[in-house]
Image (cartoon, rainbow, N blue to C red):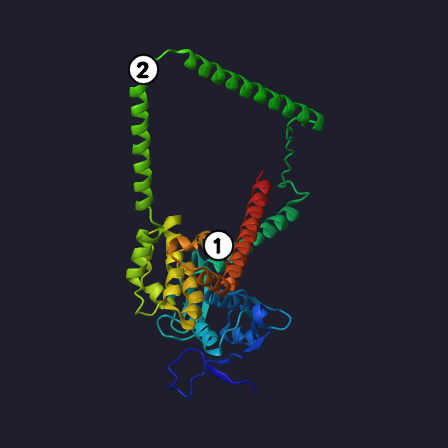
Protein backbone atom coordinates (compact mmCIF):
# COMPACT_ATOMS: atom_id res chain seq x y z
CA UNK A 1 0.00 0.00 0.00
CA UNK A 2 1.31 3.44 -0.98
CA UNK A 3 2.26 5.87 1.75
CA UNK A 4 -0.03 8.86 2.26
CA UNK A 5 0.26 12.31 3.79
CA UNK A 6 -2.10 15.16 4.70
CA UNK A 7 -3.43 17.63 2.11
CA UNK A 8 -2.86 20.84 4.02
CA UNK A 9 -3.60 20.73 7.74
CA UNK A 10 -1.14 21.47 10.55
CA UNK A 11 0.01 17.90 11.15
CA UNK A 12 -1.41 17.73 14.68
CA UNK A 13 -4.80 16.15 13.85
CA UNK A 14 -4.34 12.37 13.69
CA UNK A 15 -7.94 11.95 12.44
CA UNK A 16 -7.43 14.35 9.51
CA UNK A 17 -9.38 12.81 6.61
CA UNK A 18 -7.94 14.66 3.58
CA UNK A 19 -5.07 12.47 2.36
CA UNK A 20 -2.98 12.15 -0.78
CA UNK A 21 -0.41 9.66 -1.99
CA UNK A 22 3.15 10.65 -1.09
CA UNK A 23 5.39 11.73 -3.99
CA UNK A 24 7.73 9.09 -5.38
CA UNK A 25 10.81 10.34 -7.23
CA UNK A 26 13.73 8.81 -9.08
CA UNK A 27 16.53 10.14 -11.28
CA UNK A 28 17.25 8.80 -14.76
CA UNK A 29 20.04 9.51 -17.24
CA UNK A 30 23.24 11.45 -16.74
CA UNK A 31 24.98 14.61 -17.90
CA UNK A 32 22.84 16.93 -20.01
CA UNK A 33 20.21 14.19 -20.42
CA UNK A 34 19.50 13.75 -16.69
CA UNK A 35 15.79 13.77 -15.75
CA UNK A 36 13.69 13.44 -12.61
CA UNK A 37 10.72 11.06 -12.88
CA UNK A 38 7.62 11.09 -10.63
CA UNK A 39 5.91 7.72 -11.37
CA UNK A 40 2.81 8.28 -9.17
CA UNK A 41 2.11 11.79 -10.47
CA UNK A 42 -1.35 10.85 -11.77
CA UNK A 43 -2.38 9.37 -8.43
CA UNK A 44 -1.26 12.51 -6.53
CA UNK A 45 -3.14 14.86 -8.86
CA UNK A 46 -6.21 12.58 -8.61
CA UNK A 47 -6.16 12.84 -4.81
CA UNK A 48 -6.04 16.64 -5.18
CA UNK A 49 -8.88 16.59 -7.75
CA UNK A 50 -6.81 18.61 -10.16
CA UNK A 51 -5.70 18.01 -13.76
CA UNK A 52 -2.27 16.30 -13.92
CA UNK A 53 -1.43 18.50 -16.93
CA UNK A 54 -2.06 21.64 -14.85
CA UNK A 55 0.04 20.28 -12.00
CA UNK A 56 2.86 19.38 -14.44
CA UNK A 57 2.79 22.89 -15.90
CA UNK A 58 3.04 24.34 -12.38
CA UNK A 59 6.08 22.15 -11.65
CA UNK A 60 7.73 23.36 -14.86
CA UNK A 61 6.98 27.02 -14.09
CA UNK A 62 8.31 26.85 -10.53
CA UNK A 63 11.42 24.78 -11.30
CA UNK A 64 12.20 26.54 -14.59
CA UNK A 65 12.46 23.20 -16.44
CA UNK A 66 10.42 21.38 -19.06
CA UNK A 67 7.86 19.19 -17.28
CA UNK A 68 5.66 16.70 -19.18
CA UNK A 69 2.88 14.35 -18.02
CA UNK A 70 2.51 10.97 -19.75
CA UNK A 71 -1.13 9.88 -20.18
CA UNK A 72 -0.11 6.21 -20.69
CA UNK A 73 2.20 5.73 -17.69
CA UNK A 74 0.49 8.42 -15.51
CA UNK A 75 3.96 9.65 -14.57
CA UNK A 76 5.67 13.02 -14.95
CA UNK A 77 9.18 13.78 -16.22
CA UNK A 78 11.04 16.96 -15.24
CA UNK A 79 14.26 17.90 -17.01
CA UNK A 80 17.28 18.14 -14.72
CA UNK A 81 18.09 16.66 -11.33
CA UNK A 82 15.74 17.78 -8.52
CA UNK A 83 15.70 16.62 -4.90
CA UNK A 84 12.62 15.15 -3.24
CA UNK A 85 12.51 18.13 -0.86
CA UNK A 86 12.46 20.64 -3.76
CA UNK A 87 9.64 18.74 -5.52
CA UNK A 88 7.65 18.45 -2.30
CA UNK A 89 7.99 22.21 -1.69
CA UNK A 90 6.63 22.90 -5.19
CA UNK A 91 3.72 20.50 -4.59
CA UNK A 92 2.89 22.16 -1.25
CA UNK A 93 2.94 25.57 -2.94
CA UNK A 94 0.50 24.30 -5.58
CA UNK A 95 -1.80 22.97 -2.84
CA UNK A 96 -1.73 26.29 -0.95
CA UNK A 97 -2.35 28.29 -4.13
CA UNK A 98 -4.77 26.19 -6.21
CA UNK A 99 -6.38 23.67 -3.83
CA UNK A 100 -6.90 24.88 -0.26
CA UNK A 101 -9.67 27.30 0.70
CA UNK A 102 -8.29 30.71 1.68
CA UNK A 103 -10.80 30.93 4.56
CA UNK A 104 -11.26 27.50 6.17
CA UNK A 105 -8.18 25.71 4.76
CA UNK A 106 -10.12 22.68 3.46
CA UNK A 107 -9.17 21.21 0.05
CA UNK A 108 -12.82 20.85 -1.07
CA UNK A 109 -12.64 23.54 -3.76
CA UNK A 110 -13.92 23.68 -7.34
CA UNK A 111 -12.51 25.78 -10.18
CA UNK A 112 -14.47 28.19 -12.38
CA UNK A 113 -13.64 31.08 -14.71
CA UNK A 114 -14.87 34.68 -14.40
CA UNK A 115 -13.47 36.93 -17.13
CA UNK A 116 -9.68 36.71 -16.81
CA UNK A 117 -9.82 35.33 -13.25
CA UNK A 118 -9.64 31.77 -11.95
CA UNK A 119 -12.19 31.43 -9.12
CA UNK A 120 -12.04 28.77 -6.39
CA UNK A 121 -15.30 27.97 -4.57
CA UNK A 122 -15.11 26.05 -1.29
CA UNK A 123 -17.75 23.32 -0.95
CA UNK A 124 -17.27 23.25 2.82
CA UNK A 125 -17.81 26.92 3.78
CA UNK A 126 -18.99 28.48 0.49
CA UNK A 127 -16.13 31.03 0.33
CA UNK A 128 -15.14 32.27 -3.16
CA UNK A 129 -11.77 33.82 -3.99
CA UNK A 130 -9.40 34.51 -6.88
CA UNK A 131 -6.54 32.04 -7.23
CA UNK A 132 -3.06 33.45 -7.95
CA UNK A 133 -3.97 36.34 -10.30
CA UNK A 134 -1.24 36.87 -12.88
CA UNK A 135 0.43 33.47 -12.37
CA UNK A 136 1.49 31.67 -15.56
CA UNK A 137 -0.66 28.63 -14.70
CA UNK A 138 -3.71 30.81 -13.96
CA UNK A 139 -3.41 32.46 -17.38
CA UNK A 140 -2.96 29.06 -19.07
CA UNK A 141 -6.09 27.59 -17.39
CA UNK A 142 -8.18 30.64 -18.35
CA UNK A 143 -7.00 30.46 -21.98
CA UNK A 144 -7.64 26.71 -22.07
CA UNK A 145 -11.18 27.18 -20.74
CA UNK A 146 -11.92 29.93 -23.29
CA UNK A 147 -10.60 27.75 -26.11
CA UNK A 148 -12.84 24.83 -25.09
CA UNK A 149 -15.83 27.15 -24.68
CA UNK A 150 -15.29 28.59 -28.17
CA UNK A 151 -15.18 25.11 -29.69
CA UNK A 152 -18.27 24.07 -27.72
CA UNK A 153 -20.23 27.09 -28.94
CA UNK A 154 -19.23 26.28 -32.49
CA UNK A 155 -20.44 22.67 -32.22
CA UNK A 156 -23.74 23.85 -30.69
CA UNK A 157 -24.21 26.30 -33.56
CA UNK A 158 -23.52 23.57 -36.14
CA UNK A 159 -26.01 21.26 -34.43
CA UNK A 160 -28.64 24.02 -34.46
CA UNK A 161 -28.03 24.62 -38.17
CA UNK A 162 -28.49 20.88 -38.86
CA UNK A 163 -31.85 20.98 -37.06
CA UNK A 164 -32.98 24.02 -39.04
CA UNK A 165 -31.89 22.56 -42.38
CA UNK A 166 -34.91 22.02 -44.66
CA UNK A 167 -37.30 24.02 -42.45
CA UNK A 168 -38.85 27.41 -43.24
CA UNK A 169 -36.68 29.10 -40.61
CA UNK A 170 -33.43 28.02 -42.31
CA UNK A 171 -31.89 30.84 -44.32
CA UNK A 172 -29.15 30.26 -46.90
CA UNK A 173 -27.20 33.23 -48.22
CA UNK A 174 -25.10 33.02 -51.35
CA UNK A 175 -22.12 35.36 -51.18
CA UNK A 176 -20.30 36.27 -54.36
CA UNK A 177 -16.66 37.18 -53.76
CA UNK A 178 -14.96 39.13 -56.54
CA UNK A 179 -11.43 37.80 -56.85
CA UNK A 180 -8.57 40.13 -57.58
CA UNK A 181 -7.03 39.60 -61.02
CA UNK A 182 -4.13 37.17 -60.77
CA UNK A 183 -0.82 38.19 -62.27
CA UNK A 184 1.07 35.56 -64.18
CA UNK A 185 4.62 34.67 -63.27
CA UNK A 186 5.75 36.17 -66.59
CA UNK A 187 4.07 39.53 -65.78
CA UNK A 188 5.58 39.65 -62.29
CA UNK A 189 9.04 38.90 -63.68
CA UNK A 190 8.90 41.68 -66.28
CA UNK A 191 7.42 44.12 -63.76
CA UNK A 192 10.27 43.49 -61.28
CA UNK A 193 12.83 43.94 -64.09
CA UNK A 194 11.20 47.19 -65.14
CA UNK A 195 11.21 48.50 -61.56
CA UNK A 196 14.84 47.49 -61.14
CA UNK A 197 15.79 49.28 -64.35
CA UNK A 198 14.02 52.44 -63.17
CA UNK A 199 15.90 52.29 -59.84
CA UNK A 200 19.23 51.91 -61.67
CA UNK A 201 18.43 54.95 -63.85
CA UNK A 202 17.62 57.04 -60.74
CA UNK A 203 20.89 56.01 -59.08
CA UNK A 204 22.88 56.90 -62.20
CA UNK A 205 21.14 60.27 -62.39
CA UNK A 206 21.96 61.10 -58.75
CA UNK A 207 25.57 59.97 -59.22
CA UNK A 208 25.97 62.27 -62.24
CA UNK A 209 24.49 65.22 -60.31
CA UNK A 210 26.98 64.72 -57.46
CA UNK A 211 29.88 64.49 -59.92
CA UNK A 212 28.83 67.70 -61.66
CA UNK A 213 28.55 69.49 -58.31
CA UNK A 214 32.08 68.45 -57.29
CA UNK A 215 33.47 69.72 -60.59
CA UNK A 216 31.67 73.03 -60.14
CA UNK A 217 33.04 73.37 -56.59
CA UNK A 218 36.61 72.83 -57.82
CA UNK A 219 36.21 75.52 -60.45
CA UNK A 220 35.29 78.15 -57.78
CA UNK A 221 38.31 80.32 -56.96
CA UNK A 222 38.71 81.03 -53.22
CA UNK A 223 41.13 83.63 -51.93
CA UNK A 224 43.87 82.37 -49.53
CA UNK A 225 42.50 84.21 -46.46
CA UNK A 226 39.02 82.69 -46.84
CA UNK A 227 40.52 79.22 -47.46
CA UNK A 228 42.65 79.47 -44.31
CA UNK A 229 39.66 80.58 -42.24
CA UNK A 230 37.53 77.74 -43.60
CA UNK A 231 40.25 75.18 -42.80
CA UNK A 232 40.61 76.55 -39.24
CA UNK A 233 36.85 76.34 -38.65
CA UNK A 234 36.79 72.79 -40.01
CA UNK A 235 39.61 71.69 -37.68
CA UNK A 236 37.85 73.23 -34.68
CA UNK A 237 34.63 71.46 -35.59
CA UNK A 238 36.41 68.10 -35.82
CA UNK A 239 38.13 68.62 -32.47
CA UNK A 240 34.83 69.58 -30.85
CA UNK A 241 33.06 66.48 -32.24
CA UNK A 242 35.92 64.25 -31.06
CA UNK A 243 35.70 65.70 -27.53
CA UNK A 244 31.95 65.10 -27.51
CA UNK A 245 32.38 61.48 -28.62
CA UNK A 246 35.01 60.85 -25.95
CA UNK A 247 32.80 62.43 -23.28
CA UNK A 248 29.81 60.31 -24.34
CA UNK A 249 31.97 57.19 -24.34
CA UNK A 250 33.12 57.82 -20.79
CA UNK A 251 29.60 58.63 -19.65
CA UNK A 252 28.15 55.54 -21.32
CA UNK A 253 29.90 53.01 -19.13
CA UNK A 254 28.18 49.63 -19.23
CA UNK A 255 29.38 48.71 -15.77
CA UNK A 256 27.76 51.79 -14.25
CA UNK A 257 24.30 51.32 -15.75
CA UNK A 258 21.75 52.71 -13.20
CA UNK A 259 19.93 49.39 -12.91
CA UNK A 260 23.17 47.48 -12.26
CA UNK A 261 24.06 49.91 -9.48
CA UNK A 262 20.54 49.55 -8.07
CA UNK A 263 20.73 45.73 -8.27
CA UNK A 264 23.99 45.67 -6.29
CA UNK A 265 22.39 47.91 -3.63
CA UNK A 266 19.30 45.72 -3.35
CA UNK A 267 21.32 42.48 -3.14
CA UNK A 268 24.64 43.06 -1.32
CA UNK A 269 27.21 40.29 -1.51
CA UNK A 270 27.03 39.54 2.21
CA UNK A 271 23.27 38.76 1.95
CA UNK A 272 21.68 35.68 0.30
CA UNK A 273 20.43 36.04 -3.28
CA UNK A 274 17.37 33.74 -3.52
CA UNK A 275 14.02 33.44 -5.26
CA UNK A 276 12.27 34.81 -2.17
CA UNK A 277 14.55 37.88 -2.11
CA UNK A 278 13.71 38.64 -5.76
CA UNK A 279 9.96 38.39 -5.05
CA UNK A 280 10.25 40.66 -1.99
CA UNK A 281 11.99 43.39 -4.03
CA UNK A 282 9.79 43.06 -7.10
CA UNK A 283 8.50 46.66 -6.98
CA UNK A 284 12.01 48.17 -7.04
CA UNK A 285 13.10 45.90 -9.93
CA UNK A 286 10.01 46.74 -12.00
CA UNK A 287 11.05 50.40 -12.18
CA UNK A 288 13.21 49.57 -15.19
CA UNK A 289 10.71 48.23 -17.74
CA UNK A 290 12.67 48.84 -20.97
CA UNK A 291 14.83 46.30 -22.76
CA UNK A 292 18.13 47.86 -21.62
CA UNK A 293 16.94 47.94 -18.01
CA UNK A 294 15.97 44.25 -18.10
CA UNK A 295 19.24 43.25 -19.77
CA UNK A 296 21.13 45.25 -17.11
CA UNK A 297 19.34 43.21 -14.41
CA UNK A 298 20.36 39.95 -16.09
CA UNK A 299 23.99 40.97 -16.52
CA UNK A 300 24.05 42.28 -12.92
CA UNK A 301 22.81 38.87 -11.77
CA UNK A 302 25.50 37.15 -13.84
CA UNK A 303 28.16 39.47 -12.38
CA UNK A 304 27.00 38.62 -8.86
CA UNK A 305 27.47 34.91 -9.64
CA UNK A 306 31.11 35.72 -10.51
CA UNK A 307 31.68 37.74 -7.32
CA UNK A 308 30.02 35.19 -5.00
CA UNK A 309 32.23 32.37 -6.33
CA UNK A 310 30.35 29.41 -4.89
CA UNK A 311 28.52 26.30 -6.07
CA UNK A 312 25.60 27.12 -3.77
CA UNK A 313 25.07 30.48 -5.48
CA UNK A 314 25.22 28.77 -8.88
CA UNK A 315 22.62 26.22 -7.71
CA UNK A 316 20.28 29.10 -6.83
CA UNK A 317 20.83 30.82 -10.19
CA UNK A 318 18.06 28.94 -12.03
CA UNK A 319 15.53 29.69 -9.26
CA UNK A 320 16.47 33.39 -9.24
CA UNK A 321 16.25 33.58 -13.04
CA UNK A 322 12.88 31.82 -12.93
CA UNK A 323 11.65 34.33 -10.30
CA UNK A 324 12.59 37.21 -12.62
CA UNK A 325 10.61 35.51 -15.41
CA UNK A 326 7.55 34.44 -13.39
CA UNK A 327 7.16 37.92 -11.84
CA UNK A 328 7.39 39.62 -15.28
CA UNK A 329 10.53 41.52 -14.23
CA UNK A 330 12.41 40.18 -17.28
CA UNK A 331 10.51 39.06 -20.37
CA UNK A 332 11.39 35.85 -22.22
CA UNK A 333 12.63 37.78 -25.29
CA UNK A 334 15.20 39.68 -23.22
CA UNK A 335 16.23 36.51 -21.33
CA UNK A 336 16.90 34.74 -24.63
CA UNK A 337 18.81 37.81 -25.90
CA UNK A 338 21.01 37.80 -22.77
CA UNK A 339 21.58 34.03 -23.14
CA UNK A 340 22.65 34.32 -26.79
CA UNK A 341 24.98 37.33 -26.38
CA UNK A 342 27.52 35.92 -23.95
CA UNK A 343 30.15 37.85 -25.94
CA UNK A 344 28.88 41.08 -24.31
CA UNK A 345 29.52 39.87 -20.76
CA UNK A 346 33.05 41.26 -20.70
CA UNK A 347 31.63 44.78 -21.15
CA UNK A 348 30.06 44.36 -17.71
CA UNK A 349 33.28 43.09 -16.12
CA UNK A 350 32.33 39.38 -16.27
CA UNK A 351 35.02 36.84 -17.10
CA UNK A 352 34.54 34.21 -19.81
CA UNK A 353 34.61 31.24 -17.38
CA UNK A 354 31.69 32.59 -15.32
CA UNK A 355 29.74 33.42 -18.46
CA UNK A 356 30.06 29.83 -19.74
CA UNK A 357 29.22 28.28 -16.34
CA UNK A 358 26.10 30.40 -15.89
CA UNK A 359 24.76 29.68 -19.38
CA UNK A 360 25.41 25.94 -19.08
CA UNK A 361 23.53 25.99 -15.78
CA UNK A 362 20.41 27.66 -17.22
CA UNK A 363 20.22 25.69 -20.48
CA UNK A 364 17.18 23.70 -19.23
CA UNK A 365 15.43 26.93 -18.21
CA UNK A 366 15.96 28.46 -21.68
CA UNK A 367 14.46 25.31 -23.26
CA UNK A 368 11.54 25.62 -20.84
CA UNK A 369 10.63 29.22 -21.79
CA UNK A 370 11.04 28.39 -25.50
CA UNK A 371 8.63 25.48 -25.03
CA UNK A 372 6.17 27.78 -23.23
CA UNK A 373 6.44 30.31 -26.05
CA UNK A 374 5.58 27.61 -28.61
CA UNK A 375 2.56 26.49 -26.58
CA UNK A 376 1.28 30.08 -26.32
CA UNK A 377 1.67 30.55 -30.09
CA UNK A 378 -0.24 27.31 -30.76
CA UNK A 379 -3.05 28.39 -28.40
CA UNK A 380 -3.18 31.83 -30.05
CA UNK A 381 -3.48 30.15 -33.47
CA UNK A 382 -6.33 27.98 -32.16
CA UNK A 383 -8.15 31.06 -30.81
CA UNK A 384 -7.64 32.90 -34.12
CA UNK A 385 -8.98 29.93 -36.08
CA UNK A 386 -12.03 29.74 -33.80
CA UNK A 387 -12.69 33.47 -34.20
CA UNK A 388 -12.36 33.14 -38.00
CA UNK A 389 -14.81 30.21 -38.05
CA UNK A 390 -17.31 32.24 -35.99
CA UNK A 391 -16.94 35.20 -38.36
CA UNK A 392 -17.57 32.96 -41.38
CA UNK A 393 -20.57 31.38 -39.68
CA UNK A 394 -22.06 34.81 -39.02
CA UNK A 395 -21.78 35.91 -42.69
Give me the residue at 31% from left, 69% from top. Answer: 271
Indicate the position of residue 222 as horizontal and vertical percent values.
35, 13
Badge number at residue 288: none
- Asked whether, in this view, residue 53 is left or right of residue 166, the answer is left
Give the CA separation, mark 2 to mark 1.
60 Å
Which mark's residue is nearer the viewer, 2 or 1? 2
Please report contact status of discs 2 and 1: CB closer than 8 Å, yes or no: no
User: In terms of secondary structure, where does tag 2 sit?
Assistant: helix
Q: Nearer the viewer, residue 339 or 335?
A: 339
Q: Is residue 14 above or below residue 388?
A: below
Dot 2 or dot 1: first in sequence order is: 2
Q: Nearer the viewer, residue 109 or 319?
A: 319
Indicate the position of residue 200 as horizontal and vertical percent values.
58, 22
Indicate the position of residue 257 as horizontal and vertical percent values.
33, 51
Residue pointed to by mark 2 = 224
Residue pointed to by mark 1 = 336
- Asked whether, in this view, residue 105 is left or right of residue 33, the answer is left
Q: Nearer the viewer, residue 179 or 24?
A: 24
Amino acid sequence: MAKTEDIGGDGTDFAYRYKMEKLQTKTEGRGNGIKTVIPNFGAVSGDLHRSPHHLAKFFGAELGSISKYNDQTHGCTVNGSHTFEALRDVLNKFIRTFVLCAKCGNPETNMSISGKDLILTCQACGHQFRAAPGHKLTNAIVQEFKGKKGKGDKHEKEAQEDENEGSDTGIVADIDVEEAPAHSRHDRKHRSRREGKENDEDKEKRRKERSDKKKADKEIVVDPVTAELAKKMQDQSRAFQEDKRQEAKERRSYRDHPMMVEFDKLFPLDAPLTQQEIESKKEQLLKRKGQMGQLAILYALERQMMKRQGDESLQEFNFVLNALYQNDICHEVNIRTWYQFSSLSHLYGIDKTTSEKVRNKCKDFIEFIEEEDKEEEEKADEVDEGALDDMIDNL
